[in-house]
Image (cartoon, helix red, strand yellow):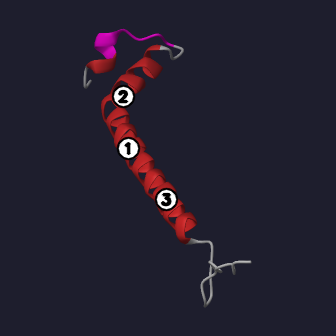
Amino acid sequence: MASRVSLKTKGKVTGKGSKGSDERSITQAVKEWTNWTMKKAKVVTHYGFIPLIIIIGMNSDPKPQLSQLLSPV
């Protein structure tokens, strides 16, 4: 009978080779998603704050006119 060849390597073998790269790619994806979300939130806040205040002011109890809300006096 022919002898079998062992495919085992010597030394410490860990199964983290592909797992580590997967964790890094997931971490990178989370960082990119967070960065994209923060950029979008900044734009929404920048362009939406004043209109939100005007809408809240128009829906208040005395019901002011739009010109009264926008005038400085």
Question: Mark 2 = which residue?
Answer: 48
Q: Residue at x 31, y 30 (%)?
A: 47
Task: Identify the residue at image location x=65%, y=80%.
Answer: 6
Numbered label attached to residue 4: none
Label 3 belongs to which residue? 27
N-terminal of the pair, mark 1 or mark 3, is 3
* Numbered range of the magenta stretch: 62-68
Of the pair 55 and 33, the residue shown nearer to us: 33
Dot 2 amino acid type = Gly
Give the quadrant of residue 2: bottom right
Q: Position of residue 11 (x, y in %)?
A: 61, 91
32 or 5, which is in the foreground? 5
Which of discs 2 and 3 lies nearer the camera? The answer is 3
Q: Residue 71: give x, y in percent of width and height.
A: 25, 20
- Residue that label 1 marks: 36
Let me know if residue 60 is in the magenta part: no
